[in-house]
Amino acid sequence: MGRSERLGSQLPVTPPTLADVAERAGVSRQTVSNAVNNPDLLRPDTLERVRQTIAELGYSPNRAARNLRTRTSSLIGLRFAPAQEGTANAAMDRFVHSLVEASEEVGYHVLLFPGDDEDPVGGYDNLLRSTAVDAFVVTDTYLGNPQAAWLSQQRAPFVAFGRPWDDDEARHVWVDVDGAAGTRLATQHLIDRGHTRIAWIGWRKDSPIGEDRRSGWLQTMHANGLATTGLASRVEDVVHSGAEAAAVLLDESEPTAFVCASDTLAMGVLHTLWIRQLAPGKDIAVVGFDDSQVAQVYPVGLTSVRQPLEDVAVEIIKTLRALLSHQPVETRGVLLTPTLAIRESS
Amino acid sequence: MGRSERLGSQLPVTPPTLADVAERAGVSRQTVSNAVNNPDLLRPDTLERVRQTIAELGYSPNRAARNLRTRTSSLIGLRFAPAQEGTANAAMDRFVHSLVEASEEVGYHVLLFPGDDEDPVGGYDNLLRSTAVDAFVVTDTYLGNPQAAWLSQQRAPFVAFGRPWDDDEARHVWVDVDGAAGTRLATQHLIDRGHTRIAWIGWRKDSPIGEDRRSGWLQTMHANGLATTGLASRVEDVVHSGAEAAAVLLDESEPTAFVCASDTLAMGVLHTLWIRQLAPGKDIAVVGFDDSQVAQVYPVGLTSVRQPLEDVAVEIIKTLRALLSHQPVETRGVLLTPTLAIRESS
DNA sequence: TGACGGCCTTGGATCGATCAAGGGGGTGCG
DNA sequence: CGCACCCCCTTGATCGATCCAAGGCCGTCA
């Protein structure tokens, strides 16, 4: 029902209140409240009658009133930063959607607020002080970002997407994707395809995420008794850096395959291959990281490590609920394993 | 200040209320309220005193209480759908960020909720009934989508991003980007580069957006006295369709340039060029639409029409504010002009 | 008959900000 | 001197749901 009825009816100027429902159903306000929040307390027939009236009137509890009384908002704050121009990093889009879906499942909504590099905690502070959100999801836990520490100190409930790499003191809960496992997958995949000289193009050494991903490549190479000297390069995360690194590696070490820390870098590699008339997937294999739209749309599909962002979102919400209901959180961190989206480039 | 003080202080278990501030400042609650909302009503010295106390206590009005009393939420609802896998359409990401920024400027926040093709108005209905949001921004105004009509009927305030193509009855306000102007820019750009045989690859005829973009190409060609017969193709918005269309057009009509309705299709064209050993930008020019990350990251930078999403967001918020303050909205629709991001492919 | 438990009602207070009306003190004017 | 008036501030009621405590009604069982 609902559907056609809703299409036909028009919302009154002021929506019905709990008292309206109570009067119409011939019960007390308390009973209506119970029908909504503690159905078990009602006798089945009364419950049915109240529910019917609720449906007839199209009643829905006023959020503001409920929020005020219960001191909750059912809102989760998320600082929304757009993907950087000129990179292939499109993870945010998919993650946000997953988070919105997962939140909805348990009655939460996602509230976005802008970020400000000048005052990284300002947005959080405002929302917290005005009790506009119940909790936060923090996504940018990179080196030196004060948000997690600050939120912890404020005793604000939050879950981080990303490990507290640099901070052994951190006591907050987090969910992350095992980058090393991703590059292990990628490297093993290439080894299974018969490659032995597999190069790594990653980020600069000050990126713990980059070093983590690199370690997956390194481990797998060694575990398979393969040499790695002269096969690794660390550069900026921009296309032309990836292209240059690939050119140098090809000249000096003659790899037959590349594993990259990002799709952006992988695009650089593909560019170099194109210039040198080398066919990706045939002459040289390439694997990227993030399974961005670029990887999916590039004419020679780019094999890429795909983060299980849907699962990350579900895990985050699950943790958040435990946190908010003051249940003891059993594990401080959850590490999920990515998958490999295999395409023509490998 | 603020910053260092905030970092040092810890939020109390329950934040200070208006009454706390009032007592500490030696004034009444109403006076504090006025200090926040109607500073003009206070004598300068009183105002200063109250403001100082507010700063000392770190007071911020409780959202829920304010929302309840004023019957507003300062929240704008946006249905968040992720970019389709396998396409290059990354506009949502940038648009959402722009909207979040523009909202913040005027004291609004963006609330995301998931979409459901089964029940397209369900999410809107819930939020509306529970008075959780003040207004909506509707983005998917494609053919046959009942949202705009439904919201209009409910008298729910909303602004659409996208024209009501198919509905002459529509009386709601909207903001849109002039797609035809975009393809005019693209086509003229190619003509200026000396091209005369410029092909069009667009979407199927049932897409009004596609037809709009196509008309820009057509107009510009004719305005310059150039022939268009045999130079147009309408296909699905997937990479391989673009590739096939390009192959056919190259064989049958020998164009020297392509204007595409999307970056996805443009990628298809680039693929065909690659197979045929034709150099994009040298042998054949290509222009896409949307300035997606793919266009930016593709090794041969793809020239692409860029929608002014920041301006769209600002315009939407401006309109929304007028709508909510019951000011007469002077114009029913606003049409913004895109720009051309010129890269190596043309 | 009385005690008891299940189910509902009643009345009130509460969350914290805002609205609407009212009060006190000073000034100006007849 | 008295009254009107304005400025600045205060007071009580209100938004709608939830929480709490007390009690009523009815049927069952000892």
Image (tube, coloured by chain):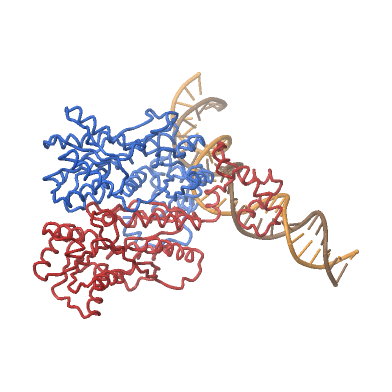
Chain colours: A red, B blue, C orange, D brown
Q: Residue furthest front?
A: B252
**Above or below for B296 versus A231:** above
For the point 35% across and 38% down, which residue is it? Answer: B207
Image coords of residue A91 (percent x, y): 32, 57
> Front-most of A274 and B330?
A274
For this view, does B153 lie left or right of residue B306?
right
Q: Residue furthest left?
A: A251
For this view, does A328 lie left or right of residue B291?
right
**Which quadrant would the C terminus of chain A be assigned to in this image?**
bottom left
**Above or below for B89 versus B226:** below
The part of the image, by quadrant, that contains residue A168 is bottom left
**Above or below for A247 versus B168:** below
Q: Please say whether residue B66 is visible from this viewpoint.
A: no
Q: Please say whether residue A232 is visible from this viewpoint.
A: yes
For this view, does A101 lie left or right of residue B310?
right
For the point 26% across and 46% down, which residue is it? Answer: B242
Image coords of residue A156 (percent x, y): 42, 62
Label total for image: 0
For this view, does B202 lie left or right of residue A129?
left
Image coords of residue A50 (percent x, y): 67, 49
> Front-most of A199 and A18?
A199
Image coords of residue A311 (percent x, y): 41, 63
**Which quadrant would the N terminus of chain A be assigned to in this image?**
top right
> Front-most of A160 and B285?
B285
